[in-house]
Image (tube, rainbow, N blue to C red):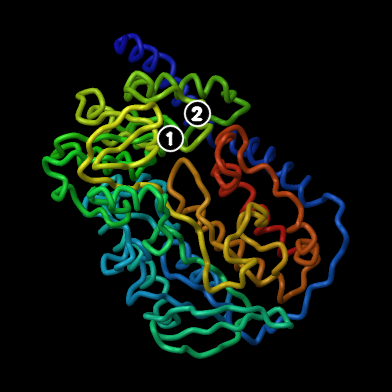
Amino acid sequence: MRFLLLLLLLFVVVPLRAVASLTAACTSGVTSAIYARAFSEWANQPVPALSLPSVRFDLPILVIGAGPAGLPVMKELSDAGLPWEAAERQAEVGGVWNPDNPLSPAYLSLRTNSSKSTTHLGDPVPADWPEYMTKDHAGLYLRQYADRHGLRPQIHFRTEITTIRENPDGSWRVTMGAPGSPGVERDFRAVVLATGFHDKNSRYFPQELWDQATRSGIHCIHGSDYRNNDPYRDLRTLVMGSGNTGAEIATEVSRVAKETILSVRTSPWLVPEYVFGIPADKFAKASPPRWLVPHWLEMKIFHLIQRYYVGHPESLGFPKLDHDLLERLPVADRGIARALRSGKITISPTVERFESGKAYFTDGTAKPIDSVVFATGYRTRYPFMPERWQEPNDGLSFWMFAPDAPNLVYMQEVGVPQGVWPVFAAQAKFAAAYFVAQAKSTPNCRRYLSLRSMPNPDFKGEIFLKDKPRFVDPKIYGESHLPAITDWIGR
């Protein structure tokens, strides 16, 4: 069977990729025209004209967070000649990739889920670095980026934001200072929230299950506290959560544990790290345009690749899937498929309760457990913001701007099947262009005040249809619509 799949890959996929490479230059114009028309339809819909509110242009813009989302904003604001300052809680840039950040969930063996071809902020990643950067490489890249663009002098390190409230004139009053101090109040023209949410302050886990497990003598940690597999040697370990973090931790733990169980709520598709020796995200990024290879055919090709390199998830023991490939964000196979085939990892349904040192599952089975890793993710939260802006909903314009606050920007981590850093770089260009256009009071900036409360254009296309709204096709969102509105808003 694998031999037949290999033949199909060689005689179908490789020629199509060759055609895609040869036609890339002449097809990009057609693809751009399709997305440009979609953006034009959104931008030209009838909306009432609004006047720009009064803005304190003499005040600097505040960027909160000096990680991969905040740094490109600082760079673009500098390039645009806009006054800005930044606040960073830690003593160094990098966010979760800062090795000295005590809130970082980065475990010792962590590598980026995406390759260096799609994990950058515009500045190239050194050619001799590994395809999937280690946490140390990622942190070094961000530090070098900050130095290269001269960002450090305007960053207030070891600075915590306590409260933020909007002034009547649309500016923001921010209380900021050293951690634990009362802080001082300062006014800023605008606030850019780039704090991220993959840190220990934002972790989520089902509290009732945690309490049940600890009461029954089971050792529990959240995935953000995992560092290496040493504590799990010869233990019966349950990993709850089958996203990328849960899959990688379970794989690593299974090498030393007595038994490793992966609790699954929604079965994921597993995708390979490499295809024909090329990082999978780089390979997928080079896919032909839709008018040349329709989506249904591209998905047939992706299914062939997935079967050859990994195998159908149900054949590995996962419960029946409720979605097709790329209808939800997939999980990279970094050894979990082999561990499942060998029996080092077994799949279980969700946990109903913990009692007397056992996990009781929703299928009626029970197993003795020594340790649990809750790889149950994180929740976006901004506790220093007024309540209505603490948890942004899915109404953010272009997943960035609060519809009811002209000078509040969220650098949200949208979901894409590749590195999100280039998306941050594109978002940063739009944010800077908006602030420049606001100062010039351009017609389109005034028009955007009305459009930002309208539904967003379609950023998904034909992928992530069953995932959260912020999961988008990067070609449509980051490479087409964001550059389009960045250019449009200045006119």
* Residue occupied by mark 1: 265
Q: Is residue 148 left or right of residue 249?
A: right
Which residue occupies 41% across, 59% down? 123
Three-letter amino acid code of the residue under disc 1: Arg
Which residue occupies 50% across, 32% down? 326
Three-letter amino acid code of the residue under disc 2: Ala
Tell me residue 355's x, y (percent).
Answer: 30, 42
- Whether residue 26 is visible here, answered yes or no, is no
* Residue occupied by mark 2: 20
Towards the viewer: 278 or 214? 214
Tell me residue 212's x, y (percent).
Answer: 33, 49
Towards the viewer: 128 or 50? 50
Quadrant in which the C terminus is drawn? bottom right
Q: Is residue 437 left or right of residue 432?
A: right
Give the mark nearer the N terminus: 2 vs 1.
2
Element on which disc 1 rests: loop
**Image quadrant of residue 385?**
bottom right
Quadrant in which the N terminus is drawn? top left
Tell me residue 116's x, y (percent).
Answer: 35, 48
Q: Is residue 120 left or right of residue 253?
A: right
- Whether residue 247 is visible here, answered yes or no, is yes
Is the C-beta separation of discs 2 and 1 under 8 Å?
A: no
User: Is 383 above or below relative to 156?
Assistant: above
Mark seen at residue 1: none
Tell me residue 110's x, y (percent).
Answer: 27, 50
Which residue occupies 70% across, 46% down? 457
Q: Residues within 10 Å of mark 2 (few under 14, many from 20)?
A: some
